[in-house]
Image (spheres, grey):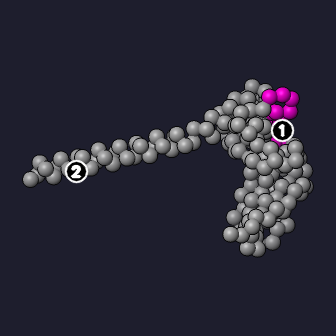
Amino acid sequence: MLKNKKKWIFLGIVVLLLLVFGLYRYYIYVTQDIRAQETAAILKAKQETSLVKVTEAQKSVWDTICWAIEGLDKDNRPVMVWVTMDEDGKVKSGEGTVHEELLSNGISENQVREKALKEIPDVKKLKIVPGMYNGQYAWQLFYWSKDHYYYQFYRFSDGQSIGGPFTLPNR
């Protein structure tokens, strides 16, 4: 009886480990495309700019698909690099595909957050992502206010509002 119980415990552990491994492999499979896009954008940014260390990479999709990559340049200064992508998730070719700015040449995420909290009444669930809007480098805000979700854009260089607020419909 004891041998039978040990056998079932062992079998249960093996099944559990196989299930965990299967879920892990499924996660890798599902995220492989986005990871490949991120890697391609980072490689392009490192090839064409002074970026040497990446601290964060975020995808932004509005009128232009781009990856905004934050990091340090060869002089250890904080920079932001925008890499535009095509609809297939490939880095676009040609001039203007990659743009680099020192973070000190624009307003920071914290400055945008402070500005938004002052200007937008009852803002909740504020998410700020670097991106592009109508060909301009911008901070994209996504937030909840007055029973709706909104998108709004602030220009990276000077913090001026350049788009929005765009109201998302309630369900």
> Which quarter of the rendered picture does the C terminus lie within?
bottom right
| Rendered residue at 40%/42% (across/down) | 21
> Does the segment drawn in magenta span residue 1?
no
Q: Is residue 95 magenta?
A: yes
Q: Which mark is residue 148?
A: none
Q: Residue visible at 74% across and 32% down?
A: 91
Residue 107 horizontal/vertical position (percent)? 84, 50
Q: Secondary structure at mark 1?
A: strand
Q: Nearer the viewer, residue 162 or 100?
A: 162
Q: Is residue 10 left or right of residue 45?
A: left
Q: Amino acid at mark 1?
A: Glu
Residue that lies at the very extreme toward the top in this rendered image: 47
- Residue 135: x and y, percent? 87, 44
Q: Nearer the viewer, residue 28 or 88?
A: 88
Discs 1, 2 touching: Cβ within 8 Å: no
| For residue 160, side relative to residue 141 (left or right) | right
The label nearer to you, 1 versus 2, is 2
Name the residue beneath numbered marker 2: 9
Q: Which residue is mark 1?
A: 101
Q: Residue at x 76, y 43 (%)?
A: 65
Magenta region: 93-104
Number of other residues with Cα within 10 Å of mark 2, as a class: few under 14, some 14 to 19, many 20 or more: few
In primary-sequence order, the first of circles 1 and 2 is 2
